[in-house]
Amino acid sequence: MGPVVDPVDPNEKLPEQVDVVVIGGGIIGVSAAMFLAERGVSVALCEKGHIAGEQSSRNWGWVRKMGRDPRELPLIIESLKIWPTLNQKTEAETGFKVTGIMYGARSEAEMAKHEEWLQYSRPYQLDTKAIGKAEFDELMPGSDGGFVGALYTASDGRAEPQKAGPAIAKAAQRMGAHVFTECAVRTIERQGGKVSGVVTEKGRIRCSTVVLAGGSWSSLFAGNLGIRLPQLSVINSVMRTAPLEGAPEHALWDKAWAFRKRLDGGYTIADGSTNVHELVPNSFRFFKDFLPAMKLEWRSYGLQMNGRFMTEAGWPKTWSGDQVTPFEKIRVNDPAPVEKVTKTALAKLKAAFPAFANAKIVQQWAGRIDVTPDIVPVISHVDSVPGFFIATGFSGHGFGIGPGAGKLIADMVMGKDPVVDPTEFRLSRFLDGTVPRPMGHA
């Protein structure tokens, strides 16, 4: 069972017409709705389950520039300008706090690997720096002494995934947005090839623009419209502790574990590297698209064959607006955590930081992360369907970048100068023969 998310009371009656319909109530979708509503655009957000029910409430809660693909850096820089304003803007607690984040190194080879990223970040004049053992031990007291240093970004921080998305959704409502839960959008209607409305399980809404922010469901939805969106998902398992005294304030990543302090005084802990990919029909359909990423990151993914293959094999490829869809049959993706992974990560963390020896695990969960072949999101208009935009495939980086991505897609929808250049996020890069290149892949 997933973490407990702050509730959002939905609006009751579907509007007959709005300017924009946003599909998906994760942090990207609610941020887009908020920035559109703030600018006077009439918007309806439709979520098939509850707000932030999937990966937007199940992630680690890190808000970081460090370690990102350079194509994402301008957007996370903008996002980190927004995060400090969100408590005031939403009139709620998002948990955002600048705490600093480190990527630890236990060997000179690991340290050199971390330092490679600095060459990508230099044009952006970030405060990220390589630190040695003495500074690491000063900033991270209580370790086993086995770290030779770290990559450190003092201006990175954290926020609370179970609070931030709902807070933004409620702010969007106060600004005039209609927010609906348990309301799956089945398909888009078109007139003259252009978007003219959506069909939801509760009725139709006329509109001229649709933003698909459906996370791991986006490829399925787009496929029904004849749009090829190469996207797969991986499962990451997470645990949280009861309040704990004496553990570090800074967030720290190690290949065997990662942790960050929570607003409630506990810690969110996960394996630093391991994700599980359940083999499904799209694993083979998109095999060539994902081959470069697989070659680069194969050590990080465990392949698993289970009942998910037959579940997805049974999903229709096309359907009409009067048919019940998979979005209604699975309201919330709630994969089981891989306890072997979390147990091992916790044991290794306790050995590295004895302050965690008495940590009491009060909950474990897993999230389904939507990934693209180059590990960079799609934030794009769709050439073949005027009025249709996609914001998905954030590849485990979406929480921190979410407010900035929401602002960017709002700019694009309104035809305004975008907060950052969206060229690197265009959907067409997967359709025009361009070879997907994850960061660090020659």
Image (cartoon, rainbow, N blue to C red):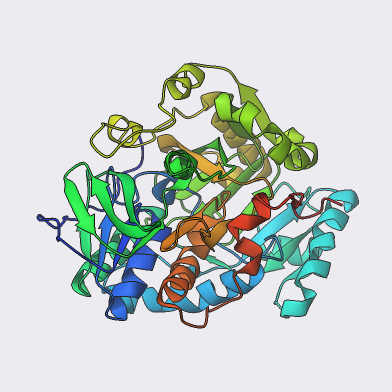
Q: Is residue 172 above or below residue 338?
A: below
Q: Depth check: give the residue in front, 424 or 342.
A: 424
> Looking at this rendering, what residue extends furthest in the left direction?
13
Q: Is residue 117 above or below residue 288?
A: below
Q: How many marks?
A: 0
Q: Quadrant of the N terminus?
A: top left
Residue in view at x 23 percent, y 66 percent: 18
- Residue drawn 88% across the image and 57% down it: 112
Residue 359: in sight, yes or no? no
Left or right: 129, with 48 as reference point: right
In the rendering, at what x and y percent does residue 343 appear? Answer: 56, 29
Dividing the picture into quarters, in which one does residue 103 lie?
bottom right
Residue 101 at least partly seen: yes
Q: Height in image: 18 above or below 237? A: below
Q: Position of residue 91 (x, y in %)?
A: 26, 74
List x then y, in percent, for residue 117. 79, 62
The residue closer to the viewer here, 434 or 134, is 434
Q: Residue at x 51, y 20 (%)?
A: 309
Apparent side of residue 212 relative to residue 170 in the rendered image (left or right) = right
Q: Position of residue 131 (x, y in %)?
A: 79, 67
